Amino acid sequence: MVLGASHHDLELSDLDRLSAGADGLSQALNDGWSTAGGHTNPIDGSAVLATCNRLEIYIDANRFHDAVDAVTAQVARKSGLDPDSVAQMLKVRVGAPVAAHLFTVASGLDSMVVGEAEISGQVAKALRESQNSHTASTALNRLFQSASRTAKKVTTHTGLGKAGRSVASVALDVAAEGGALEPGAPVLIIGTGAYARVVAAALRERGCSDLFVYSPSGRAEAFARTHQAVPVSAAELPAVIGKVSLVVACSGTTGGALTPELLGDGRSGAGRPLVIIDLALRADVSVEVRRLEGIQVIDLNTVASRSAPEQTEALTAAQDMVIAAVAEFEDDLAVRTLDPAVIALRSHVAGMVEKEMVRLRGKYDDSVAAELEHSMHRLTRSLLHTPTLRAQQLARSGEGAGYLSALHTLFGIDLNSPPTVSAGEASPNLERQGHLAG
C-alpha cells in the first residue's frame, strides 16, 4: 500500500509541515516498532518518495491496520503534527491502485509540470535509499523497478520528459519572460546540493555562462570547480547580489540564506528588480524578504499556475503505456502467488528422484548411473512442464485455490498461505485513516 499526499491534495504549506522529518522515515518505520507482547513489526518493507511537491510512503505490510497506524504515528512524530491531523492528510491506496499510482508518478503524469524529467530519478533514488537502509522488501523492489522501466518506456516512445521539462525549467522560463534571464547575464546560485546541480546545468543550456555560487555550509569552492562557477564568500555576497538580476535559492536553510538586511545592503542603488527562484517546499525565502520592494519571487505556486499540459496525443499514449504496464505487473504478481506451490511440487518430485538415484548409484557403475540420472531429470522436466503452465493460468484467472487443493489431494503437499487483504476488504475501516483512493 501507499500512504501519501501531494500538491493535488494539500496546500503547499500543509504539505511542507507534513514532510518535515521525511529523512530517515523509512528506517524509523523499520526500527520504531515495539515488540512488546510478542507482536512482530506489521511492516515487512518501506520506501519513502519525498519531493518538492509530494510525500509518499510505500509499504509492504503483513497487517494492514497496524501498518497504517505505525506509518501515521511515525509521520506525526517526525513532523510534530498530531496523529489525527496526519491521518486526515494522508491518502491511502491498497492493492492494484498502488502500482497504477507509482507508475503514473514515475512517468511524470501526476507532476505539477506534466511530463517533468526529474521525477523518474527521484523514484529511483527512493528505491536506492530503501535498499541502503535495508527496508526494501522483494515486493517493493519489483514495484519500483517496474515503475522505472515504465517511465523509461514512456519517455522513449512519447517524448514526454525528453525536452527536460521540470519544475526548475518552468521557473526559469518565467524568469526569462520577465527579462531576468538574458543570455550572458550573471546568475547567483545559493546552495550546492542536487537541485543546485540541476539548476546549474539548465542555466548553462540557456547560455548563462557567468555563474556565481554561495554555500551557507561552506561548499562553494568544490561546487564551483565542477560546475564552472565563481565561488562567493559571505563577505562578497552583498556585492554579487547587487550585480545580478536572478538568484536561485536552493540551500534548504528555510528562510535563513537571504535576509532583508542582506538584500538591503546588496540592492542599494540597484536600478532593476531582483528575481528570486525558490522552489523548495520548505522555502529558502522568508516572508519578510518577499515583502521587500523590487523583489519578485518565483515559487512552486507560480510554477503550478504556469504549467500547461502536454499535447493530448502524447499524454494519451503515455497513459495507455502505464495502463498496459500495470496490467502486466499485476499479471506477474498473480502468477507469483503460486510460485511456492510450483516450487513445492518440483521439490517433491526431485526428492523422489534423488531417493531412487541413491538406490541406482549403489547398483550400477558411475557412467550408467549418470546416464540414468540424466534421463530421469529430462523426464521430470517434461512431466512438470504442464503443471507449471497450469499454475500460471490458474493464478491469472484467480483459481489458484483449486491448484493448491489438487496438490494436497494428489501428492499430499500442504501449503498454508497467510490470507491477503484486498482493497475491497480494507475500505470499510479506513474512515479514521483519511480515505481510500481507487
Image (spheres, grey):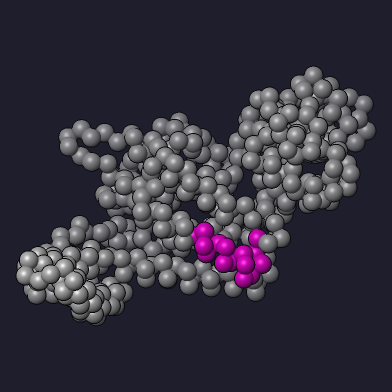
The answer to which of 79 and 224 lies nearer the viewer is 224
What residue lies at 70% left-to-right and 31% top-to-bottom? 222
The residue positioned farthest toward the top in the image shown: 235
Q: Quadrant of the C terminus?
A: bottom left
Residue 329 vertical placement versus 298 (above, below): below
Could one spot residue 159 in this view of the protein?
yes
Q: Is residue 267 left or right of residue 20?
A: right
Q: Position of residue 49 (x, y in %)?
A: 50, 47
Q: Quadrant of the N terminus?
A: bottom left
What residue lies at 15% left-to-right and 60% top-to-bottom? 416
What range is drawn magenta here? 147-161
Residue 117 vertical placement versus 136 (above, below): below
Could one spot residue 180 in this view of the protein?
no
What residue lies at 74% left-to-right and 43% top-to-bottom? 200
Would you identify the image quadrant in which residue 191 lies? Answer: top right
Would you identify the image quadrant in which residue 401 lies? Answer: bottom left
